[in-house]
Amino acid sequence: MLRVFLTAAVAVVIAATAWVFWDRARGPTATPIAGFSAPFVFGRFAVPPDNPLTQEAFALGRHLFYDPSLSGNNQVSCATCHMQALAFTDGLAKSPALSGGELEFSSMSLINLLWGQERFFWDGRATSLEAQALMPIQHPDEMDQDLDALITELQASRDYRRMFRKAYGEVSAENVARALSTFMRMLISSDSKYDRFLRGEVRLTAQEEHGRKLFMAHPDTKVSLRGGNCIDCHSQFLTSGFRDALDGFSNNGLDSDDDLPDGLMAVTGNPAHKGFFKVPTLRNIAVTAPYMHDGRFETLEEVMDHYNDGIVVSDTLSPLILEADNAPEAGQGTVGLRMTPDEVQSIIAFLNTLTDEGFLTNTQFSNPFEGDG
Amino acid sequence: MRIWMTGLAILLFVGGALFFALGPQRTTSITLTFHAKMGDHPLVFDEFVYENPGGRGTFRVRDFRLYLSNLTLSQDGALFAEPDSYHLLRFDNPETTNSIRLNDIPLGSIENVRFMIGVDPEANGSIQPRGDLDPNSQMAWNWEVGYKFVVMEGTLRIGEEVSPLVYHVGFSDNAREVDIQLPPDIAVEGDVDLHMNVDVAKLFDGPTQVDLRKLSSVKFNRDDAAMLADNYAVMITPSFK
């Protein structure tokens, strides 16, 4: 009897050990993320063939995104500057730099990154999310982490070893970038009031609808068409910049030639791109103040004052901005849309329909180290 | 058994021979290369090097692009229409050219090329992405009107004074057909290489001559838009070598 029992026990142990080895040795077992929903009006998107969207990569990416051990001092995570409740911005004009002072640019929201421009950062210097993801980790003023040290650290953790194995196979810097990218690609916001309006589920109020029309129209005094011309740069459904080539970058009149930052020119070397910045998505814009690449505007009212009569002329200023004017008579010193206060308020009301509460509180996007993650 | 095999072999042979004899003949490929020009010279972006055709001042071009759609190739009444034929032609590259290539067209040769500058009313009224039509792109417009067909943006300078130039021409009525007859000897081994000039100058100096100072923007005014459409109707011409 004992003999039988012992033999059985040995067999079980052997089988279990074999399974453990086999499980470690075999390739990743990632499950593709099947048919996630995105409105057809968002249009086409592309996922790099060598980094398919999988549940395991998403889970790993989410952990990495919220894990301060990705930083040199183990105190800063991506989420420090990209907080879900603020549509993944940080609520500051400029985030504090590790070495004291502040970063050069304001943090950017992370929303619907599968669509819109295929370049990242305000000046478009990263040409894929994979290329972008390792930059803040190594940046001396952001997370200041040595990649080799990071990989050693991650390898020491059993949980990470398991998650990497399932998602990709090995623990590597490349796979850190891939997983973070997968997490960010899935940050899809498509249930704002505007989306529900587009799906025919709700009506906009008269003021919101007025604002929507103004947002979507370039003014033409010749045919008495009034407009805010936002659609000239912020696409109508995504509200981000355009995807093709460099169409999603532009100079919206923040600075004069004397103090115009390089912007996209730093990347392309083309002087016609001086002062061009990435046209940001306006989804969840009500919660991402302060605004613009340097966070110079505190409120949407200030943003609208800028577009309405605060445009600063420079050589590369968009001619669409310079030309868009709702007043028939020539301007007196100021440049801008010159809309009525009512019209300005209507556009702000429309911008408020872009807030997606479900996105800001979706537990799949929240910190996995807290609660039931 | 043997007899069956032999029968099958004969059948296969005859079938194959028939297939090659009667099946589709040669196919043809075509490359359409569009060269953006200002008059006789390649278009230059972002420099004040062009004279206002109808008045004072010099201007620069910041952006020029157009939709070409409904590309049809024909030979002797046999027609090939490219499916989902919507091409955005943009020229912001060092050669200021843009090419469209179609392979394996089921025509023995090509005698005639036809397309539209602009978009047909059906596609123009839809928000479904097709070909290069994209409702989230820069060519999307006021949705009551549809897409912009031809876009030219730039700046006019008169003395020290600069002012913006914005020409966005749309409206379904303003799509214009272009019909090009090819010379008989253009195909080389089933491959047609067709070059065409897209002369931006024609936009302001076609049937109607435009003073850019007086008419510095065209958007939703129907008469102005139709006038520019008649001008761009003659903008694309073949250049046979």
Image (cartoon, helix red, strand yellow):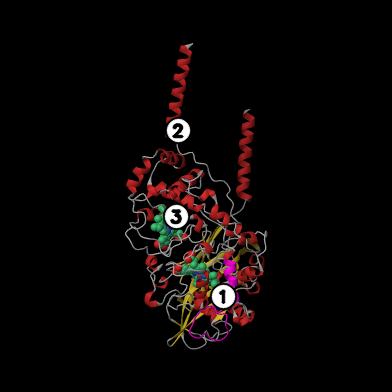
Residues at marks 3 and 1 on the same chain: no
Residues at marks 3 and 2 on the same chain: yes
Residue B83 lies in the magenta stretch = no
Disc 1 or disc 2, which is closer to the eye?
2
Place of residue A344 in the rendered image (x, y in percent of width and height, measured from the top left): 57, 74
Q: Quadrant of residue B206?
A: bottom right
Counting residues from the start of the chain, the first of labels 3 and 2 encountered is 2
- In space, the residues marked 3 and 2 are separated at their CA atoms by 30 Å
* Image point (44%, 23%), residue name: A13
Q: Which chain carries label 2?
A: A
Q: Mark 1 lies on which chain?
A: B
Task: Please tell me which residue lies in front, B165 or A288.
Answer: A288
The residue that label 2 is drawn on is A23
Q: Mark 3 lies on which chain?
A: A
- In space, the residues marked 3 and 1 are separated at their CA atoms by 34 Å
Q: Which amino acid does label 2 sit on?
A: Asp
Residue interval drawn in magenta: A324-351
Give SS at disc 1: strand
Q: Main secondary structure of the magenta part?
A: loop
- Vertical placement of A72 versus A340: above or below? above
The residue that label 3 is drawn on is A129
Circle 1 residues within 10 Å: few <14, some 14–19, many ≥20? many
Place of residue B35 in the rendered image (x, y in percent of width and height, measured from the top left): 49, 71
* Image point (63%, 27%), residue name: B1
Q: What residue type is labelled 1?
A: His
Place of residue A176 in the rendered image (x, y in percent of width and height, measured from the top left): 41, 47
